Image (cartoon, grey):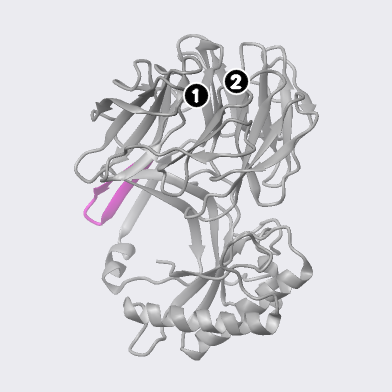
Amino acid sequence: MIPTWVGPQAPCSGYRLRMSSDPVVAFQQGQAEADTASLAARQIGLAGSGMGGTIIYYDIENYNPANKACRKAVTSFISGWTERLHYWGNRSGAYGGACTSYVSDWASTVYPPENLWVAAWNAVKYKKDVSLFGITCLPDTLWPNHQRIRQYAPGHNETYGNVTFNIDSNIADAEVVIPTHAISSLLSSTSYISNLADILDYGDIQNSPDQSWLIIDGILFRNALNHQDWQPIIGPLSEAAIRKAFFLDDRHGWLIATTNEINHQLFVTNDNGQTWQEISTPSLDTGWLPHSLQFTDTQNGWIVVKQLTRSNFSNGILHRTTDSGKSWQAFDLPIGEAVRFTTPEVGWVAGGVGGNELYHTLDGGRSWRLVKLDLPKDGRITISLPTFTDYKNGVLPVIILAQAENSFIIYTTQDGGETWQLRDTYTNLPEGFSTVNFINPQVGWSTTTVGTCRSTGVGKDCTLESILWTTNDGGNTWVVEEIPGRIQ
């Protein structure tokens, strides 16, 4: 386990609870948080007979951009946190974004934390052979001696034994807490086989539903033969990975390509991907990653960028263009999730940390209002984006993950989303089914990450696998899609 404490954030951040901008006061606040965290660790059995004997990491979320005074206050706070943990006999750790929490600053303080948990994403789910070094904004010389944990993938769903949960992926070579009863099982021989694919984006072409596209491992594929013949599309930059895409019809499409986690470029095609032209990209602060891309016509488009952070935060910014990408406006989003616009002014965003939020805009994304639904009371709820056949009539997919049985619910509207009524409930779902994206009321896509383990007598053999699913009957039945280059 990685015991983590969340308290006051940077004085220049947008969080409600912030530490003082005075470094002296911030130091004292760090000490006070360490006192409370140490007591809590004792109460739940992590610490010993006193209040010591464990490692606790402090969570500093994104506060980029920041001035020197703000960074100095945060560094002083972490110093106070560490000093006080040592007083109680505990070890100190701190979590933050490599570039956006300025973690390198913490190495130069009077009381630096012994361990660093750094957020530096280079995948979307579990990945083999991730390096703890070579991280932008974090010199290899800092925390080099078994002192690093790297969060390399954001929150995503994984399923084991038909139990689905949301988790980010990390590689750990630093101090953690291992319950004593778990040591024997951890020391047993376990092997892992991964058939995971980085399925980054997918969908049907907006005005050509018999054609589909898919981004896997940074490569863009398209097909027009009922999803049976995926063909790669040559991207605009041979050294870049494609992260997001959107196709309006069989000629017009857009994609976002990146050479690292900082530099992102937007391209457009008017000839079915034969050629690409770079267009203006919204200015993205470090630590904000492209999350969704959509155009309703060749003039009006939106890009959502999501903040690099832990899975219990969902922060996003919406960038809008009305002139084919020549210029962009930025608007706040209530949650950092994908958007879907049915007209240049009418749009939706769904999900959030709990998965159960739905918002509606009537002014192109400038303002949003919360939509209340009559949802089941039990289970984890995941609301997906609605899709419409016309301005008034649409469907809203909702997934319910419950202890007894998982279900997939369809709501309908006849008044443009002002009210929603329950239409269908399906329970015969693929294992690991927890997210869905409907292109129209009949056609939908889903990805699952499913793990299985079997005992070998001396340990376990475990397999993780990515599976792509589609439905053509509104969610009643689902079939496995062949993933290009992968054996299903």
Residue 412 or 296: which is nearer the viewer?
412
Residue kind at label 1, given as amino acid type: Pro
Report how far apart the C-alphas of labels 2 and 1 lie in the structure.
9 Å
Ranked by sequence position, the earlier of labels 2 and 1 is 2
Residue at 67% x, 46% y is 261
Q: Quadrant of the C terminus?
A: top left
**Residue labelled with disc 2:** 232
Q: Left or right: where does residue 2 sit relative to residue 250?
A: left
- How far across and how far down the image is residue 227, in percent? 46, 15
- How far across and how far down the image is residue 297, in percent? 66, 18
Regarding residue 128, the answer to whether it shows in the image is no
Residue 278 is covered by the magenta coloring: no
Residue at 23% x, 28% y is 428
Residue 244 or 411: which is nearer the viewer?
411
Residue at 40% x, 35% y is 435
Q: Are marks 2 and 1 in contact (CB under 8 Å)?
A: yes
**Main secondary structure found in the magenta portion:** strand
Which region shows up in magenta? Answer: 451-464
- Dot label at residue 122: none
- How far across and how far down the image is residue 46, in percent? 36, 77
Residue 461 is covered by the magenta coloring: yes
**Residue labelled with disc 1:** 484
